[in-house]
Image (cartoon, helix red, strand yellow):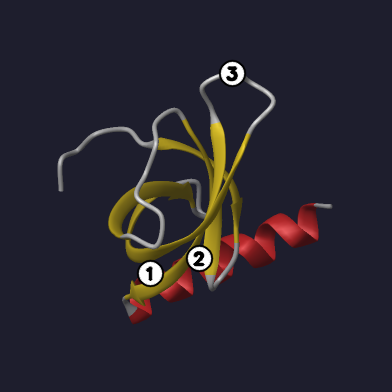
Amino acid sequence: MTEAVVGWLGNLSESGMLIQAGQTLVEDGLYQFRFSLIAADGNRRSIEVGAHHLWAEPAATPGQSWIGFRFIDLSADDTARVREWVAADASAH
């Protein structure tokens, strides 16, 4: 909503994500995020999610923290895009 960069995506699953944040977020808060994924066809896809802040802990870098979120609102199209991206990433390892 503010178009502010909150952090960097550290891990992504169909049900949630982990970010490394450079700012403090409200514990147990609800957030709206937008991020991009590179699809199998090489195109960048924008994903929008509603997410619930579950936990936070300090990262090794001063002023940074790891924050875990559970998705609470993800469209069917964006769910399919995340699912495709996760499957492609898993097959690359």
What SS does tag 3 mark? Answer: loop
Disc 3 crowd, CA 10 A, few/some/many (<14, 14-19, 20+)? few
Q: Is residue 58 left or right of residue 37?
A: right
Q: Quadrant of residue 57?
A: top right
Disc 2 crowd, CA 10 A, few/some/many (<14, 14-19, 20+)? many
For discs 2 and 3, the disc positioned in front in the rendered view? 3
Indicate which disc, 3 or 1, sits on the residue closer to the N terminus.
3
What SS does tag 2 mark? Answer: helix
Q: Where does the image place residue 24, in percent across and percent down from the top left?
A: 39, 36
Distance in Å between CA atoms under marks 2 and 3: 30 Å
Residue designated by label 3? 62
Residue nearer the viewer, 86 or 50: 50
Residue designated by label 1? 78
Q: Where does the image place residue 9, in percent across and percent down from the top left?
A: 52, 43
Q: Where does the image place residue 85, in percent across and percent down from the top left?
A: 57, 60
For discs 3 and 1, the disc positioned in front in the rendered view? 3
Residue designated by label 2? 82
The residue drawn where x is 36% and y is 81% is: 76
Q: Is residue 85 left or right of residue 49?
A: right
- In the image, residue 58 above or below residue 50: above
**What is the residue that sits farthest to the bottom in this orientation?**
76
Indicate which disc, 2 or 3, sits on the residue closer to the N terminus.
3
The residue drawn where x is 63% and y is 20% is: 61
What SS does tag 1 mark? Answer: helix
Count the marks: 3
Residue nearer the viewer, 71 or 87: 71
Kind of residue at disc 3: Pro
Disc 1 crowd, CA 10 A, few/some/many (<14, 14-19, 20+)? some
**What is the residue that sits farthest to the left in this orientation?**
1
The residue drawn where x is 31% and y is 53% is: 33
Kind of residue at disc 1: Asp
